[in-house]
Amino acid sequence: MSRRRRSAPPVRDNAGRIWQNREKRSDKSPDYGGEVIVAGVAYRVSAWYSPPRSGDEAPSYGLRFEPKAEADRRRAERSSAPRDEPPPQRGFYDEIPF
């Protein structure tokens, strides 16, 4: 059987959703991401999980909110920016004079 991902209902004002980040690129990447709407403005949410420390009863989460329009603009700039590529390596046959 194929698993079909259900589309989530639209987010209402003063509510939101987060999902587990399955494409973490480094330890500093957020563990969860999603979006919320507060007072009619959409925000991207990034969340980092911290397990309970000794003496604590529950885990903690660090959150960052960024306006969705700004986050989308930054993402587009990063994907279209030229990447620094090393100069091509000279091969053995590049120096043969004939």
Image (cartoon, rainbow, N blue to C red):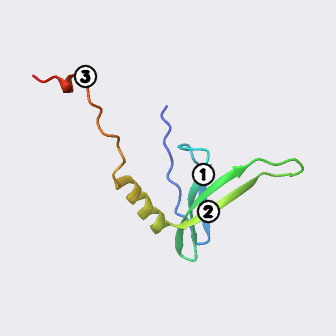
Residue topped by disc 2: 64
Q: Kindly give the residue lying farthest to the front in the view shown.
A: 97
Tell which residue pokes out farthest to the bottom in this image. 39
Distance in Å between CA atoms under marks 3 and 1: 45 Å
Q: Nearer the viewer, mark 3 or mark 1?
A: 3
Residue at image location 52% in from the left, 63% down from the top: 10
Sequence-first tag of 1 and 2: 1
Locate residue 62 relative to residue 26 in the image: left or right: right
Task: Kindly check if marks 1 and 2 are in contact, taking CB atoms under 8 A apart as contact.
Answer: yes
Q: Amino acid at mark 3?
A: Phe
Q: Earlier in the sequence, mark 3 or mark 1?
A: 1
Q: CA distance from mark 1 to mark 2?
A: 9 Å
Residue designated by label 1: 30
- In three-dimensional space, the C-alpha distance between marks 2 and 3, rounded to whole angstroms, equals 51 Å
Q: Which amino acid type is marked by label 2?
A: Arg
Return the residue at label 3: 92
Q: Residue at x 48, y 42 (%)?
A: 4
Mark 2 or 3: in front is 3
Q: How many marks?
A: 3
Q: Amino acid at mark 1?
A: Pro
Q: Is residue 32 above or below residue 36?
A: above
- Picture quadrant where residue 96 is located: top left
Q: Position of residue 11 (x, y in %)?
A: 55, 64
Closer to the chain start, of discs 2 and 3, is: 2
Say left or right for 9 vs 52.
left
Q: Which mark is residue 56?
A: none
Is the C-beta separation of discs 3 and 1 under 8 Å? no
